[in-house]
Every structure is written in C-alpha cells, then in structure tokens.
Amino acid sequence: MAAAFAALVSLQNNILLLINNHHNHTFSFEREQIVSLLDIVCFLIDFVESYDDSHGSRRETAEALEMRIAHAAQVTADVIKAHMVHQIRCGKTRSSRFLLDLHKATQGMDYMRRKASIVSSHSGLLEPSTNPSSSSSTKSTPLVTSSNMVGFDDILLQLLHLLTGPPLRRRVIPIQGMGGIGKTTLAINAFKHPYTVHHFDVCLWATISQDYSIQKILSQLLSCLRGSTSGTVDEMQERLYKSLYGLRYLIVLDDMWNLKAWDDMNVKSLFPDTNNGSRVVVTTRNANVANHVGDYRVTMGFLDEDNSWHLFCQNAFAEQQDCPPELEETAKKIVARCKGLPLAIVVVGGHLRKSPTALAYWENVAQSILYSTGNDEHCLNVLYLSYKYLPAHLKPCFLLLGAFCRR
C-alpha cells in the first residue's frame, strides 16, 4: 500500500494548503466540497495504514486495490494543482471548470471510500490495530553478523585455510553461490575473524554491485587505508598500489556481477604481488566470474533440513529457541518452503519473532511463501514479507532504499 499511502498523503497536504490559504483569500473554492473530500482522504489514509492483505486476499487483489486508490488520489491532486496554478496566474476568479472537475474527482474518491468500507467490514479493519509491526517485540537479529553462521562452520574453516595457508603468491579466492545463500555473511565472518586480523597487515573491503563505479570502488579501498580519495582514477590506482606494496593484505570485493567489472578494475595490476601471502576474495553469484578470477573457489550450497530448522528457531524464538508444540507443524512447513536458503529463513524467522503466535497467523505466513522455479524470484517472494508487514508510512521508505541498494 506504499503507492496509495504516498499519493493520499500528498493529496491531503494539497487540500490542507487550500484550506489554510482560504483564510487569506488567496484561493476561491467550494469549502463544503473540499472539507468533504478531506474527510474521504483521511478515511482512506486510515484504511491504508491498517490494511493487511493477509486477510484472505491474494496479493494481486491487494495490489489492484492499491493502484486504484493511488490513481484516484493522483487524479484529484492534479485537479487541485491545476486550480492553484490557475488562481496564481489569473487572480481570484472562480473557475467553473475547477468545480466540475473537483466534483468528478470527489466522486471517484468517494467510490474508493465505499470499496474500502466493504473490505474493512469483511476483514475487521479500522479497529484497534493488530499489526505485528506495532506489537511489542524482542530485539531483532541482524541479517548479517560476524559471529554465528549456522550450518557453515566447515566452509568458514575452509576459507580461513585458503586465506592464511600456502601458497605465498597472491591468490584470488572467489565465493560463489546464488543470491541470499550467505556469500557476504561468510566473507564478513572470515574478514573479522581474529586469526585473519592477526595474520594480515591490512584488511580492505569494497562493494561492487551491479551498477558500479571504479572511482567509488577505489575510494572505498583507500578509505580503509585512511588515504586520500581525491584525484583521477589513474591517480587513485597508483596511490592504492603504492600503499599496498610490501604489505600482506586481504581485500574483499563483494558482489561482483560480471567479468566487465573485474576487467575494468584491472585487478592483477592494481594489487601488488610481493610473494608474501596476500589474498583477494571475490563474492559473486556468477559461475563464469568465479571460474575466471580464481583457480580455487568456495561454492556455497543450501542448508540441510536440520540446520535450516536450527537457523529458523534461532531467529524466530530469540533466547527461547524452542518452537511451541502447537506451532511446530506449521513452522516446519514454513522452513521447508524456504528451501534451505539462509536469507529466506532469516527474513521469515525475524518477521515471526515480532508477530502474533496465533496458529492462523503462522498458517497465513506459510501460504505467503510462494513456490518458485527461479531462485531470484523466490528471494523476492520471501523479501516481500518484510515489505508487506511494514507500517504504511514506512513502505515508501523501504522502496526508496531498495532503489539504492540493488544487489
């Protein structure tokens, strides 16, 4: 409901602006009609804030309702904005066209109010909120930690051996696996491990991502060295090379999507090889990248049933870490639908940790996790739960951040 909420709040602000300026006689309008429209908008805002599409509705139905409310609000806002521009340009003359357009727009908004009322009566909305996000909760577990990796102890030890063991020549170690499998988490655990910190002179981290900038990557690496991040790309490359020369370094290049990024960075000439055991770690979901950049890669697979269950309980039940008997069958269904994907298990478990423990609620969550043949699509379906249960005013923020954090 993020689009509908944003459109309604924007419309509400425009209406309030009209009402406030009415006292200064800046704008002329039918006050009764505007106040009536404001009441409708306030009702719809309350509806959107309390709306939960888990009340027996399919996601497609919820999205269709949201789009219709957002469209009606945007049409009405356009009418009011056009009137305000007209009044500024032409003075205080009454616009019959505005009154007609406003009447039609108000009818459209009132129709959406009636549709919302029907949905509310069927789902018990606009009552005291039972939104799980507003309920008391224990402290949530972060998605990425530097301590506990359920089910990946052996692979962490394998990576630590590759980092600190032979050969002495500079080695590039790719960590490869699908999105959400835990590549970055594994790299963080190795990066922060006391043995690693003691073994290397410097440890640097840069995030590449799909839309990368060589200058920004170099800036990240130089910042870790507390060096200057100004100058051209060539100047920054030379500065980084000289800063690393003679040091035993560990560099993590996280989330490399394609070989072009590797070639653009010119890694082999950027990081000096002084035969002292330096290492470069590259995390990627692309098998071609992993095969190209390193001679020995770490491949991450799915969690088995036991580790999936352990990770879920750790995130869903906090200190308790024991599933109530009445929820166990549904909880195991939820874990099975996560298909051993750590990110999915952590996201769903973290959500349920802050949610009601009613069996019907958990059953609804289980149904919300859709089966999918595409791994990325499955991740999106699971992450949708994080979005769906946010308060309406936070959903636009979630989407905006998503635009800057594509991974």
Image (cartoon, rainbow, N blue to C red):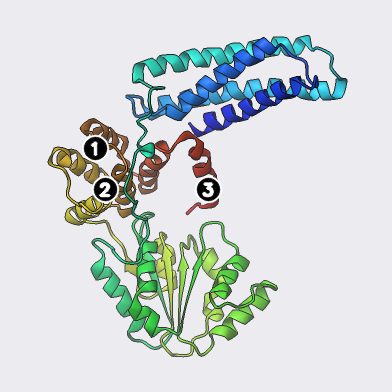
- Circle 3 or circle 2, nearest the eye: 2
Tally of numbered tags: 3
**Please, what secondary structure does the residue beneath circle 1 have?**
loop
In the displayed structure, 15 sits above or below 214; it is above
Q: Which residue is mark 3?
A: 401
Amino acid identity at mark 3:
Leu
Q: Nearer the viewer, residue 224 or 153?
A: 224
> Quarter-wise, where is residue 86 in the image?
top right
Classed neighbour count for the residue bearing mark 2: other residues with Cα under 10 Å, few (<14), some (14–19), many (≥20): many
Q: Is residue 328 left or right of residue 16?
A: left
Classed neighbour count for the residue bearing mark 3: other residues with Cα under 10 Å, few (<14), some (14–19), many (≥20): few
Q: Which residue is mark 1?
A: 357
> Quarter-wise, where is residue 102 in the image?
top right
Residue at x 39% of width, y 88% of height: 168
Classed neighbour count for the residue bearing mark 1: other residues with Cα under 10 Å, few (<14), some (14–19), many (≥20): few
Q: Which residue is mark 2?
A: 316
> Quarter-wise, where is residue 75 in the image?
top right
Amino acid identity at mark 2:
Ala
Residue at x 26% of width, y 64% of height: 152
Q: Is residue 28 left or right of residue 347?
A: right
